[in-house]
Image (cartoon, rainbow, N blue to C red):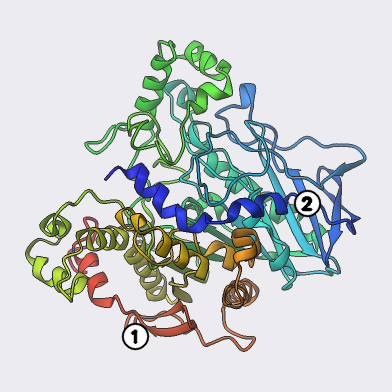
Amino acid sequence: MNKALRVLAGLAACVLVAGCATAMGQMTPPSATDGTVTVESGKLAGATADGVTAFKGIPYAAPPVGDLRWKPPQPAAAWTGARDAKAYGSDCAQQPFPLDAAPSRVPFSEDCLYLNVWRPADATRNLPVMVWIHGGGFVNGGSSPAIYDGSNLAKQGVVLVSFNYRLGRFGFFGFPALTAENPNGPNGNYGTMDQIAALKWVKANIDAFGGDPGNVTVFGESAGGASVHTLLTTPLAAGLFNKAIIESGGGRGALMGPRYLSKDSPQSPSAETIGVNFAKANGIEGTGPEALAALRALPADKIVNGLNMLNMTATQGAQAYAGPMIDGQIVAETPDEAYRADHMAKVPIMIGANNADIGFTDAKTMDEAFAGFGADKDKAAMAYDPDHAGDVHLVSHNVAMDKLMVEPARLTAQLFSGQGLPAYEYRFAYVAPSAAAFFAANPMMALFSVKGAQHASEIPYVFNTVDAAFGNAVTPADEAMAKDASAYWVAFAKSGNPNGGGLPEWPAYSPTGDVLLNFTQDGPKAMPDPWHARLDLTATHATDAPKTQ
């Protein structure tokens, strides 16, 4: 099956009636009043409504345009007077795609390095800080979608920060002249450099909003979750955060596949090789300063060139876009390699995936679905198809999902726990009644997706923005789940422990019990992982698994 169709189907249950919420999220409450703070670059005038003051469109770095295209982020320029901070800045340049579960509400631009802050209107001092990193395959997304609104988290006593980072070829690009221009690096992972710059801005400025720069939790989903893995393992982010939450971010190997800045490998060409090929496709020959100048002079739409989540592997091809890469400075090894070698920030983590999360497979038969298990093929059949139903689509999806998302989350919890660090694993299995009705009314969806909590479907519950996700289809059960999920996330941000406030107990992860918190249709429940056997098989046959595992 075409991978683009699978991605589209995987997102479909998340969007459902999200279109009505986009318009709702653009409304400014009529009772809004001004609030002012002073940061390093100048004064900001935000807006207060319903007990929350929001500051939007704050530049945390200089616009990465012209000669600053494909350079590390530079400091934002100072301004005079009070800068209006009531509207989002542009989301980063990209090609949107239909049925995006988190559609942007602002224009796209190469000038996009802006962040947003929500705080309780009566904020005093030393509030916990949560910093959100959006997903989108490193080619789509932004901080403006309605489901990422930080108001309902701020109401629970935290300061919430979200930000944009360069995407696609703007954010992840290699070219020989770039390496020559900046021989001491870092090079290539410009989007990750933006993330680090945003965290440095938070460290330097969040006190002005009542936030505690010594109590920062970074959290993200999908590409954002993979970014958290990188931030946990790069020395360039050392000391910039104190806790981490990873939602559907993988953790075994590189989420987007292995890629090096300058070294071609049998699996894939280097980012520099891809960059040279991209230049040639745009009529630019050579690899020196003149070629780089010509690349920097290309219009932004030529750099985007239609790239988005639905075509970055199917239409664009692996030869056309590098994505995050091992550059030797920001990224020197894969997350699991770093964790095994004790090369990570010593912080508490929460990590998990959804029970119908994303996974890619072209298997057409059961033998193909179980091919990766070798001599354990019969054990895999018992673990993944205990009733002998023979549903190739379901089984092959679950095998691929476990390999990409579910087992790597458990592995990360195991490795952190093994280092004596608090780790909390979850599985999100709650499905909105409107999503269940959607599947029931559209049986053809079964050809593309599996029933359950799809990739990214936990986000409106974590942010308690189910109104933005489902509009008039929100049910009391949705609201209850959002109240619980957001409370766990906030509790963890406050103390490094998600428990408290009358919530069902969430035990810290231990390999001996393999207990996680399952967000079920009947609410959150701690239980031994029901997929323990199949995940053990997946771990044993992972291509990067140690022989002693």
Amino acid type at image mark 1:
Gly
Question: Could you tell me which secondary element the residue under label 2 belongs to?
Answer: loop
Nearest to the observer: residue 355 or residue 181 = 355
Q: Could you tell me if residue 186 is visible in this image?
A: no
Q: Disc 1 vs disc 2: which is toward the camera?
A: 2
The answer to whether 225 appears left or right of 544 in the picture is: right
User: Are the two marked residues, 1 and 2, in contact with CB atoms closer than 8 angstroms?
Assistant: no
**Image coords of residue 535 (percent x, y):** 26, 70
Q: Position of residue 334 (x, y in %)?
A: 36, 52
Residue hosting label 2: 27
Q: Is residue 9 above or below residue 471?
A: above
Among numbered discs 1 and 2, the one appearing first in the sequence: 2
Q: Quadrant of the C terminus?
A: bottom left
Q: Which mark is residue 513?
A: 1
Q: Residue at x 33, y 57 (%)?
A: 404
| Residue positioned 36% across, 50% down in the render | 254
